[in-house]
Image (cartoon, rainbow, N blue to C red):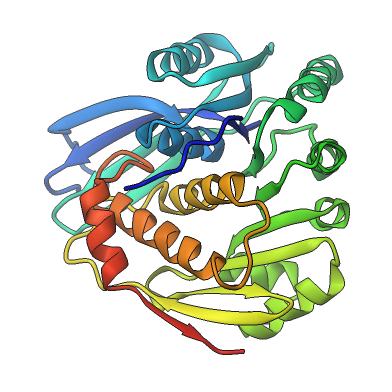
Amino acid sequence: MKVNLEPRPALAVSLNSAWQKTLSFNNLKLGDVNRAFESHETGGGKGTNVARVFRLLGCPVSVAAFVGGFPGESLRRDFEKTGVRPLLVNCRGVTRCVYTVINHARGEATELIEPSAPISEEELSQMRTLLLEEVPRHGIVALCGSLPPCVTSSFYAEIAAMAKRSGVPVVLDAAKDIGCVLEEGVTLLKINAEELSQVTDGEHDAIKAGMALLARFKGLSWLAVTDGGMGAHLMSKNGVWRFKTPRLEKIVSPIGGGDCATAIMARRLAEDPLADDMSMPGYFAEALACASASCLTDTPSVFEPSAAQDILRRTAIERLI
């Protein structure tokens, strides 16, 4: 997959990162003793998954994260091993673990998530100071996922404001209490259909909900909405596009697919911050193809570029408005 190199790296803000453990079973039976035939561990959480895609494509990326305890040290070593530039704040709480359980007989993947440790005011202040210095050095900022206890969405809004002052595009992949972030200005909001309905007070028509959101927040340029096998939509104030990817024969694990899409969109916006109606639909089709390809592997956000290219060739794009 061809990627134009960008002088400045991407920054994935991953304040609720995790250490990911994946267990594969031939036929998982609940309420019984199950022995995995394979297991592996890697960094987890949305921002870490986004960074994994950048490294897969050979692109520079930094990750801002809190780390604590043995899982936090494992995450730190994983960043160093994979070439991710770590922007880490040590915290007293232990980094959570996330367990992905794959049942190959049924083609199902279940995710078990430990509770996150709270972040202190001192630790949050250290992260704020770090980001004030680092945000202007990057070509794109991706705000990824939920926030740990004691950190509110206003902190994401602070980071968005930092990026705005430095002319750095912002991608937001979060849904809870994001109004204050969108007020600061977001280049792209990536969200799924269920989350969009929640953000827009229960509106289930994705196009109506999306256009209402774009009208409400003048600083929001693009909205990308995924809906699993039901397709996806890309919206701006000037248009709406519908996308349909081909049906996958065998899904191994969908975990990290959305993060993969976020990473590809962030990469393209880093290269082309003024992307318009001519280029953005193609970028989103590429992002969806890579996300679909990642569902064919057991590691979050990892995909074979050749598989993504094949899916992209068979992805349908229709302009609705």
Corner quadrant of residue 152: top right
Q: Residue at x 16, y 31 (%)?
A: 38
Going by the image, does 219 lie left or right of 315? right
Number of numbered discs on residues? 0
Q: Residue at x 68, y 57 (%)?
A: 274
- The image shows residue 88, relative to residue 297, as above or below, that is above
Instruction: Tell which of 38 and 232 is nearer to you.
Output: 232
Assign the C terminus to one quadrant of the image: bottom right
Instruction: Tell which of 208 and 198 is nearer to you.
Output: 208
Q: Residue at x 67, y 65 (%)?
A: 222
Going by the image, does 31 lie left or right of 232? left
Where is residue 298 drawn, in percent x and y?
26, 42
Where is residue 308 drawn, in percent x and y?
28, 56
Going by the image, does 105 lie left or right of 15? left
Where is residue 303 drawn, in percent x and y?
29, 45
> Is residue 94 visible in this depiction of the protein?
no
> Is residue 50 visible in this depiction of the protein?
yes
Instruction: Tell which of 183 and 40 is nearer to you.
Output: 183
Corner quadrant of residue 64: top right
- The image shows residue 314, relative to residue 299, as above or below, that is below
Where is residue 34 drawn, in percent x and y?
18, 37
Q: Residue at x 49, y 39 (%)?
A: 50
* Residue extending furthest toward the bottom: 320
